[in-house]
Structures are given as structure tokens and as C-alpha cells.
Image (cartoon, rainbow, N blue to C red):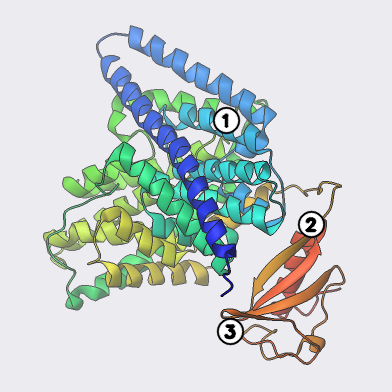
């Protein structure tokens, strides 16, 4: 009997990548938490002794100077890092893994740890991808093998940050890599499990956002899930607009070099930390606090406006930090706000407000990231309960539909397009492969291979149908569910993927 060891070998490699990423990201997460505790302590002490303000000013200045230097030397560390990883996997840009890894790690701690409204999850994904790339290059992988290890590292990074290996794997496949081939998902899942195991040894078994709930949401109250989804979808579109257009605000400060723009949110951080120290950071503790002690309507409204404006301002400065956790925090606030208002008017019992908080986190992320499956699984793993699956699905789908009707786009894809500069591939070109799925309703569906005008830079070398791979001929019929294996030069990979995507969507003005 002859064994097929290709997947097994990549699963083993995924486990190795995941273990390495787990250590890197767990230390990253731990130091951010400790740093944030220190900053909170200093702000509290500043009420009694002004010397602590001087200490805070020195810390903030060090963070500003260090990050401005890091961003100038390595622009790819700006922001969450998820758009950069997505662009790298698509062949739109390339990164030096070591340059990104250490600067993102140090810069992320210095920007997220000082209390800005930034998340650790996006940077963790980029850190994981950098580790995966480094291991791939050290083991002489290139092309698809290299991308698989980068995707595995990215999955491991999110898993270590959130302790949610299933959702982390799905997020990379659904939102970042856009590829569900068995080799990709098995490697990514193995890496995510290994990273999660390492992270659990650092932080324990308690889910990141564990909340106690009293009862499952009754069927006769499901109309509230639809209304909550609509509410989240409308405000999710607002968040998308502000995040994608915050650069217009920063353009008002043309006299400040782009790598020094962080001075604006850092200055604003001083009064915020002095008067509201409990609100600092990405929002993990704030979510748990809201869930454990429901605030009043006016306080929730104030928290929402503060988180909405200052999180977009923090992210727009270009500092290493993400929007993943800030999105969940705003979602939790909106869920509490809806629940409190509904309870006030006697439309919903108080005991279901916590349920609304949980559902709203998923719905808000689903509509902004346009990744509803990831949102459902992520909140399920982070909260630690399977009792919410149906309500989570209703809220997520409703919110997603609202943003889709408003022509909102996946936030990370839109951020990538805004920041993308045309990447010039390395002159050492080599033959590479693409795997392109054929979805139901695609123009490619039920067409013979000869009926398609394929881009001249590529060659269709195989069609994957289930577990079987066949070599296509001119009369081979392409079916929905097939995966097309395309061979092309590494320099043309992104261009070929775009052209075939245009064909699949039957864009009439496509030109060969």
C-alpha cells in the first residue's frame, strides 16, 4: 500500500509553526496586559502626585519615538497587519519577515500597552504570519508551500490571542486567504491548535470573554434579534465609513510627518486616562465589566461614542495595533444599549440583556468584517457556550445583510486596497500555482474548458473535484464545487487571480 504523506507532512509543519507562534504571541499578549496594568496604576496615582504624570509622559514619549522610527524603517507594520497578510497571500505585496516580526512585536506592545483603543489580535495574526514565513524560508519552501505556512502562522497568531482555534482557522480561510483547500485548512488548524495549547499554558482554561448567562433566548423574543441585527448593521456601516476615511482628518495636520501622527491620540490619552482609566486598552476588561454590571443608557451611549471615535482615531494614526477587539467592544456596548432600552420599555426582560451583549459582538464583527461564520464561531469559543448558536446566526446574518445592502465591503479588504502600492516581484521568478474555487452561479459553472478565454499568462493544469484530481481537456466540464489548479509565474499570480475572478463574475469589460 502506498501512503499519501503530503497532508501529514504539512500537518506536522503546521504544529511546529503553531508552537513557535504560540510562544511569540503569548509573550506579546502577556506583556501588553502587564503594561496596561502599569499604565492604569500610574494614571490612578497621578490624582495624588504629579510626579506620576512625568513618568507617564516619559513612557508615552518613548512609545511615540520608537514607533515613529519603526514605521519609517518598516511601513508594513502599520495598523493591524491583517490587510498586509491578505495582500501577501494574494501576491500583491511582499514583506521581510524578520524586519516585520521584531518591530511589530516591540511596537505593538508600546502602542497597545499604553492604553490606546487598539487590539492585539490583528498584530498577532501578522506576527504569526511572519513566523510562518520565516520557517518557510528556512526550510526552502516557496510558492504554494510557503503561502500555506504563512496562512498557518496567521491562524496560529489569532488562536493564541483569543484561544479560539476553530474560529481562527475559519477567519484565515474565509477573510484572509480565501482558500478552503484541504492542505490549507488542515495545516492552519494544526497550527491553531498547537498555538492555543501553548497559550492555555500561559493564561489558563477560562474563555477570554466568559460571561454567565441565565437562560437561553426564547423563541418568542426572536424579533429582537432581527431588530438588534438591523441596529448593528446600520452602526457597523458608520464604523466602516469612519475607519476608511479617518485619513481625511489626519490630512488636516499636514505639518506632522506621517510617522509622527500618533502624537495626536497619545496627547488625547492623557485626559482620557486621568478621568476614565478603566476604559483604556482594546476593551477586553470593559466587555466583561459591562456584562457583569450593566450600566445606564446614558453611560452606555457615552461609552459607545467614545469607543467609536477614539478607536478609529487610534487606528488611523498608523500605530501597530488592530481593530478586532475594539469592534467586539463596541458591539458589546451596543448590545447592552439595545437590551437596556428594550427592558426599560418592558419589551424584553432584564435577564436577557447579557444575551444581547453576546449576540451583538458577533453581529457587529460579522457586518464590519463581512465574515459571519467566523463571527459566530469566534464568540461561541470566546464565551465558552454552545447555547447561543441559533441567536448568533440570526443576528449575524441580519447585520451582514444590512451592510451588504448598503454596499459595505469587508473592512480588511478595503483597508488593503487603500494602502496598497503596486508590488514589483523579485526578479528571480519561478513557476507557482493558484487554487481557484468555482462557486454556484459562477460564469465558469457548466462551461467546457475550451469555452473560457483564459489569461495568456497561465495554464489550467488540474481540476480538483472532492478528493479526486483530474487533468482537464478542452471538453472537460467545469462544475460548481470544483477547484481549478492554475499554473503561472510568481510575478503574475495576483494579476491572473484577478482576471480569472473577473471571468468567474462575468465582467463583460474584461480584456485579455
Q: Using the image, determine if residue 253 lies above or below residue 180.
A: above
State which quadrant residue 4 falls in: bottom right
- Mark 2 highlights which residue? 490
Q: Are discs 2 and 1 less than 8 Å apart at CB?
A: no
Comes first in the chain, label 1 or label 3: 1
- Residue name at image x 62 percent, y 47 percent: 84
User: In the visual, does 24 lie left or right of 488?
Assistant: left
| Image location (x, y in percent) of residue 203 | 30, 39
Front label number (3 vs 2): 2
Label 3, residues with CA under 10 Å away: few <14, some 14-19, many ≥20: few
Q: CA distance from mark 3 to mark 2?
A: 28 Å
- Mark 1 highlights which residue? 102
- Residue name at image x 74 percent, y 60 percent: 494
| Element class at badge 2 | helix
User: In the visual, does 133 lie left or right of 43?
Assistant: right
| Element class at badge 1 | helix
Farthest front residue? 1
Task: Residue 284: tell me if it is visible.
Answer: yes
Q: Nearer the viewer, residue 476 or 412?
A: 476
Q: Nearer the viewer, residue 66 or 266?
A: 66
State which quadrant residue 177 falls in: bottom right
- The N terminus sits in image quarter: bottom right
Q: CA distance from mark 1 to mark 3?
A: 43 Å
Q: Nearer the viewer, residue 469 or 166?
A: 469
- Mark 3 highlights which residue? 440
Comes first in the chain, label 3 or label 2: 3
Front label number (1 vs 3): 1
Q: CA distance from mark 2 to mark 1?
A: 27 Å
Comes first in the chain, label 2 or label 1: 1
Amino acid at each position: 500500500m502506498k501512503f499519501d504523506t503530503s497532508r501529514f507532512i504539512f500537518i506536522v509543519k503546521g504544529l511546529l509553526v503553531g508552537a513557535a507562534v504560540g510562544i511569540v504571541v503569548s509573550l506579546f499578549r502577556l506583556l501588553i496586559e502587564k503594561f496596561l496594568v502599569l499604565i492604569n496604576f500610574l494614571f490612578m496615582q497621578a490624582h495624588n502626585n504629579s510626579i506620576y504624570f512625568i513618568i507617564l509622559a516619559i513612557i508615552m514619549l518613548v512609545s511615540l519615538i520608537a514607533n515613529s522610527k519603526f514605521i519609517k524603517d518598516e511601513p508594513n507594520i502599520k495598523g493591524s497587519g491583517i490587510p498586509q497578510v491578505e495582500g501577501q497571500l494574494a501576491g500583491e505585496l511582499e514583506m521581510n519577515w524578520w524586519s516585520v516580526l521584531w518591530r511589530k512585536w516591540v511596537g505593538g506592545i508600546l502602542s497597545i500597552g499604553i492604553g490606546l483603543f487598539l487590539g492585539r489580535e490583528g498584530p498577532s495574526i501578522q506576527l504569526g504570519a511572519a513566523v510562518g514565513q520565516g520557517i518557510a524560508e528556512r526550510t526552502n519552501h516557496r510558492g504554494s508551500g510557503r503561502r500555506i505556512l504563512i496562512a498557518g502562522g496567521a491562524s496560529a497568531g489569532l488562536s493564541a490571542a483569543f484561544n479560539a482555534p476553530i474560529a481562527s482557522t475559519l477567519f484565515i480561510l474565509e477573510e484572509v486567504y480565501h482558500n478552503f483547500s484541504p492542505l490549507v485548512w488542515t495545516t492552519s488548524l494544526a497550527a491553531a491548535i498547537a498555538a492555543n495549547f501553548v497559550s492555555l499554558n500561559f493564561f489558563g482554561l477560562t474563555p477570554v470573554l466568559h460571561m454567565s448567562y441565565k437562560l437561553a433566548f426564547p423563541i418568542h423574543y426572536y424579533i429582537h434579534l432581527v431588530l438588534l441585527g438591523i441596529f448593528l448593521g446600520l452602526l457597523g456601516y458608520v464604523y466602516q465609513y469612519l475607519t476608511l476615511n479617518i485619513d481625511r482628518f489626519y490630512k488636516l495636520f499636514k505639518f506632522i510627518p506621517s510617522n509622527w501622527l500618533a502624537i495626536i491620540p497619545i496627547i488625547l490619552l492623557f485626559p482620557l486616562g486621568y478621568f476614565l482609566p478603566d476604559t483604556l486598552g482594546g476593551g477586553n476588561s470593559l466587555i466583561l465589566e459591562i456584562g457583569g454590571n450593566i450600566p445606564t443608557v446614558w453611560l452606555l451611549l457615552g461609552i459607545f461614542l467614545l469607543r467609536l471615535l477614539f478607536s478609529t482615531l487610534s487606528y488611523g494614526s498608523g500605530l501597530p495595533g488592530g481593530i478586532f477587539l475594539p469592534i467586539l467592544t463596541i458591539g458589546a456596548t451596543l448590545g447592552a444599549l439595545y437590551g437596556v432600552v428594550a427592558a426599560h420599555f418592558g419589551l424584553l426582560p432584564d435577564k436577557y440583556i447579557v444575551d444581547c451583549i453576546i449576540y451583538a459582538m458577533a453581529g457587529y464583527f460579522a457586518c464590519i468584517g463581512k465574515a459571519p461564520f467566523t463571527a459566530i464561531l469566534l464568540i461561541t469559543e470566546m464565551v465558552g457556550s454552545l447555547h447561543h448558536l441559533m441567536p448568533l446566526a440570526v443576528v449575524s446574518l441580519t447585520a451582514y445583510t444590512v451592510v451588504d445592502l448598503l454596499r459595505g465591503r469587508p473592512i480588511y479588504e478595503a483597508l488593503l486596497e487603500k494602502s496598497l502600492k503596486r508590488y514589483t516581484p523579485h526578479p528571480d521568478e519561478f513557476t507557482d500555482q493558484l487554487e481557484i474555487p468555482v462557486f454556484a452561479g459562477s460564469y465558469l459553472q457548466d462551461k467546457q474548458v475550451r469555452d473560457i478565454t483564459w489569461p495568456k499568462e497561465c495554464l489550467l493544469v488540474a481540476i480538483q473535484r472532492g478528493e479526486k484530481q483530474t487533468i482537464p481537456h478542452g471538453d472537460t466540464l467545469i462544475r460548481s464545487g470544483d477547484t481549478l489548479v492554475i499554473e503561472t509565474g510568481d510575478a503574475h499570480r495576483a494579476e491572473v487571480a484577478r482576471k480569472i475572478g473577473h471571468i468567474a463574475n462575468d465582467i463583460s469589460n474584461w480584456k485579455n
